[in-house]
Structures are given as structure tokens and as C-alpha cells.
Amino acid sequence: MESTLFEAFKLMVVGMCTVFTVLLVIIGGGKLLIKAVNRFAPEEEPVEKKAAQPQNTVSPSVAKAIEKAVAQLTGDQAQVIEIKKL
């Protein structure tokens, strides 16, 4: 029974050392890859984007049609203050 426990313990230690070694190799390879990419690949220059002018307003003809529809539906009791596109 002692030899079985000793063999199991030995197998566990060998497995843990193997996993630790593989993880160290993966970490080292990743760091090496990061250094290589940073060294040989040029950094991209940021492209400045022009802010698009938001068109939140509607055309005057559409605004008048909306105002007439609101007036007709509410019997001239409501008033359109502002119209924005979503």
C-alpha cells in the first residue's frame, strides 16, 4: 500500500511539474510574440474622423404636415413645439 501511495504522489508531482512547465512555455511564447509584433509591425496612425453634422431637423414641408395632423387630431388643442429625427 505504501508503494502505491508513493507512486501516486510521484505521478502527481510529475504531472504538476509538467503542467507548470507547459504554462511557462506558453507565457514565454506569448511575451516573445508580443515583442516581435511590437518591433516589426508599425503602429497604425489614428485616423481623424470628421464629425458628421447630425440632421435632427425635418424639412419645412414635413414639419407643416405634422403640425396640421396634430391640429386635426387634437382639434387645435395641442401645439407642436419641436420635431427631431430619432
Image (cartoon, rainbow, N blue to C red):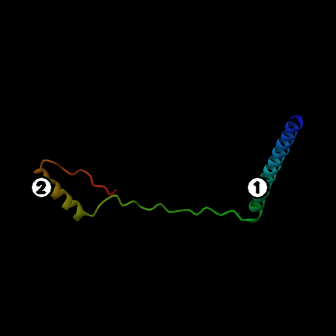
Q: Quadrant of the N terminus?
A: top right
Q: Residue at x 18, y 56 (%)?
A: 67
Q: Give the structural element (helix, strand or loop) at label 2.
A: helix
Label 1, on which residue? 30
Q: Residue at x 66, y 63 (%)?
A: 44
Mark 2 crowdedness (10 Å alpha carbons): few <14, some 14-19, many ≥20:
few
Considering only order in the chain, which callout, 1 or 2, is on the residue closer to the N terminus?
1
What residue type is disc 1 on?
Answer: Gly
| Residue 81 or residue 37, whichever sits in front | 37
Q: Residue at x 12, y 47 (%)?
A: 77
Question: Which residue is farthest right?
Answer: 3
Mark 1 crowdedness (10 Å alpha carbons): few <14, some 14-19, many ≥20:
few
- What x and y, as percent, mark residue 35? 78, 58
What residue type is disc 2 on?
Answer: Gln
| Residue 53 or residue 70, whichever sits in front | 70
Q: In the drawing, does residue 37 fall left or right of residue 54?
A: right
- What x and y, as percent, mark residue 27? 78, 51
| Residue 75 or residue 18, whichever sits in front | 18
Instruction: Give the number of the disc on residue 3.
Output: none
Label 2, on which residue? 72
Q: CA distance from mark 2 to mark 1?
A: 69 Å
Q: Give the structural element (helix, strand or loop) at label 1.
A: helix
